[in-house]
Image: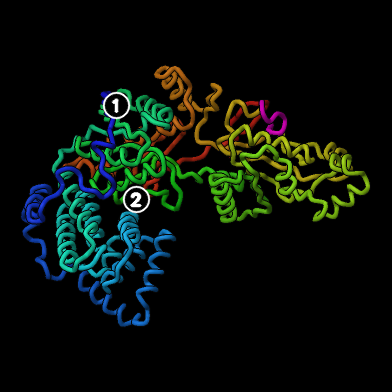
Amino acid sequence: MVVALADVDSAGDSCCHGAAPAGARRSYMHLRVLTCAAIGIVAACGQAPRAGSPWLGDTHARDQAAGAAEAEPEVSSQALVSALDEGLDEGRPARAAVLANRLWARGATLTPAQRAAVVTAVDDIPAAELEAVWGELDPTRAPAAEVALRLALWHAHLGADEAAAAWLARAREAVDAGAAAGEPAPLAERAEALAAAWQEAAQAPVDPALVAVLLPLSGRYERLGRELAAAIEVAAAGAGVRWLVVDTGGDEGRAIAAVEQAAAAGAVAALGPVGARTARAAAARAAELGLPIALLAPADGADGGADPGAGVFRLWAPTAWEAGAAAALAVALGHTRLAVLSPRDEVGRRMASTFAEVARARGAEIVRAGEYDPTGTELEPALEAFLGLDPATNPRLRRHLQRHGRREGRKSFTPEVPFELLYIPDEHERAALVASFLPYFNVELRTREFMDAVLLRRKHRGRVPQVVQLLGSSGWHHAGLSAHGGPAVEGALVVDVFAGDGGGDYLDPAALAFAERFEAHTGRAPGRMAAQAHDAAALILAALAETRGPAPRAAFTRALARARVLDGACGAAWIEHGVVTRAPMLFRVEAGAFVPAEY
């Protein structure tokens, strides 16, 4: 394996998203000539419809625009602007593009911020929806040029050169029409830059054995970047693939420049970067240049932030995937009355919400949900609120305290627990502390498979309490869990993607084999993030093995969309709708160790 390290300086080489790269400013007459040579279909360019001739969708668009004007004469421009702002705020890019197009067709003026947001919205429209959006646009007004350009880029990325040339010609016509109508210059400039950048990328020869790896090898995320780089090197050892490793510095501008460097170098695809904002910027630029990109950053939503039609994949599971897997496992184990107790932060709330959503979809009931301050030093008030231990609202507790006194009454009171399983998505130290508070409040935890009902009745003064099964997230899978949680975490179930616990125990042969190779390479044991990066590289290699034909990037995109790995460090992994999917691993804590649990 040949690894080239290149430090990309954003101050000198990168250009912000949508700005033209050096040498990209050309006249449209020059661009018309070069485009045909770039994609090798001179005849097809000569056959492109002439300006003013009917395009597929154009007549429909004009008729629809006229119909809309007749059907909505009472809708004011101010109302359309309000609807546009709502569409932008609610993440509905297709609606925003259509509304902006109607406003510009009326001669309305948008603020610079609104114009920029509309351009960004076009980038966010899923590739599969672009042609439908085009059908609703007036092709002589913005953002028709941007939509047509994205369609040109998409078809070029798929190897459909004739369709790409046709959409590029439409984009030029839309830009020319917009310029004649006095349209805002930034839109026309960006359209020219995108067309020139695509044409330049199309000229670069593609090396089907070269993959770019975009990681933060400097800056605040350097340690993470080097950990992932080492895992990728382990996965690729002896594979006969060359890797161009480019430092993004954890910066959006440098990530964009790294994508441009990868495309110019002829890489067949890019792996990385990490970080939500950095990955988003890199993905947008890669789609513009027709470079397939497999991101190592989690995302949320039904598609996980992927767009396989445009060559954008996510080889890191969405943030909340694990919570959904935990809910599915809980129901599969026969639990129907569930509760969730999560940190009061963005990740905790997302995990709790996904857990509840999936559990309900599978027929279970979320009977209680609570939160606690992840930065606070006092967990007791949050646990009391979660368990309903307020004498003012709990008559049974109030009577018990009156009979036994507050101090002794608190010790002997058995709370009403309506749930049989409690999910706590947190890191092992804080989760262990939360779990330890539950026995303090006389909540019986399932510490073994069979609990002695006679002993439980005697302990709780004639009452047989509900025994609660604890279910933890991957943050629990740490060798220090039992040291912090003690008997409270014994018998707990833990969901993870990797069979290593950071303490040297690997319960899966493939995980053990990876750990041995990683430790020989770095001198340290791998964690779950390194294991996932290893499997991402394995998926890339699996796709490369199936990449054949005269259009390597398009062939690689098709191959990655159906790639799978059976013996990854995290088990089997495959791609669905552009996002990595895998079966979760379930462990049980026994005698302080993690053992596989059946489900």
Q: Residue furthest right?
A: 403
Q: Read off the residue under disc 1.
A: 239
The image quadrant where one finds the N terminus is top left
Residue 412 picture location, percent across and down? 86, 41
How far is disc 2 from disc 1 in space, using C-alphas?
27 Å
Residue type beneath disc 2: Asp
Badge 2 crowding class, 10 Å Cα cut-off, few under 14, some 14 to 19, many 20 or more, is many
Q: Amino acid at mark 1?
A: Ala
Residue 136: tell me if it is visible.
no
Residue 411 point in image, percent of width and height? 85, 39
Say the numbered circle drawn on residue 487.
Answer: none
Give the prevailing secondary structure in the magenta stretch: helix
SS at mark 2 in the image: loop
Seen from the viewer's position, the closer of residues 183 and 83 is 183
**Above/below status of 4 relative to 273:** above
Q: Which residue is under mark 2?
A: 307
The magenta stretch spans residue 487:
yes
Spot occupied by residue 543 in the image (x, y as percentages of width and height): 30, 38
Q: Residue 47 placed where, x, y %?
A: 8, 61
Residue found 15% across the figure and 38% down from its top? 205
Relative to residue 510, is residue 476 drawn left or right?
A: right
Of callouts 2 and 1, the N-terminal one: 1
Q: Is residue 107 magenta?
A: no
Image marks 2 and 1: residues in contact by CB distance under 8 Å? no
Task: Answer whether residue 519 is visible to the viewer in this image.
Answer: yes
Q: Quadrant of the C terminus?
A: top right
